Amino acid sequence: MKKLLISVVVTAACLSFNANAALTSAKNVKYVGDTEFASFCKAAVTNDVNLFKRAVSRQVGVLANSKQKVLDLVLDSNNVSCAGKGLTEFSENRQATDVVNFIQTKTQ
């Protein structure tokens, strides 16, 4: 029983450390330039698909008349870039696998 309890505590500590490292990484990001599209970059930094989807939805009616057209526009590196890279490349470099998978399924 003690071994099980110790392994649970160690596992919980490791998971907590990984979560804190991810949050710290996101806090160290500075948004410059046109921050109207910063939520796309933030979604890639935090690997948050829901944030990415909300960012797309907020631009419907502003950039284009559908989510797919907004997505097509923001994925063009000439329109939106994060750290000088297009959203897809930036997400891949940040290892935002959930965001990359979402982008790939929506662009195929």
Image (cartoon, rainbow, N blue to C red):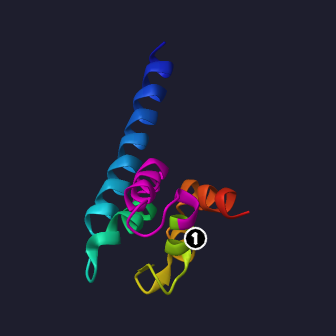
Rendered location of residue 41, percent (x, y): 40, 68
Residue at 60% x, 55% y is: 102
**Residue receiving disc 1:** 72
In the depicted structure, whether residue 33 falls above or below residue 74? below
Instruction: Check residue 54 for magenta coloring.
Output: yes
Quarter of the figure that contains the C terminus: bottom right
Q: Residues within 10 Å of mark 1 (few under 14, many from 20)?
A: some
Residue 47 seen from this side: yes
In screen coordinates, is 63 left or right of 91? left
Residue at 49% x, 51% y is: 49
What secondary structure is marked by label 1?
Answer: helix
Per the picture, the main secondary structure of the magenta-coloured stretch is helix
Rendered location of residue 21, percent (x, y): 35, 56
Name the residue type under label 1. Asp
Residue 93 seen from this side: no
Residue at 52% x, 61% y is: 96
Question: In terms of depth relative to the viewer, which is nearer, 55 or 69?
Answer: 69
User: In the displayed image of the protein, which residue is found farthest to the top?
Assistant: 1
Hey, which quadrant is residue 40 in on the image?
bottom left
Hey, which quadrant is residue 93 in on the image?
bottom right
Magenta-colored span: 46-69
Rendered location of residue 88, percent (x, y): 57, 72
Instruction: Check residue 80 for magenta coloring.
Output: no
Rendered location of residue 24, percent (x, y): 29, 59
Residue at 44% x, 20% y is: 5
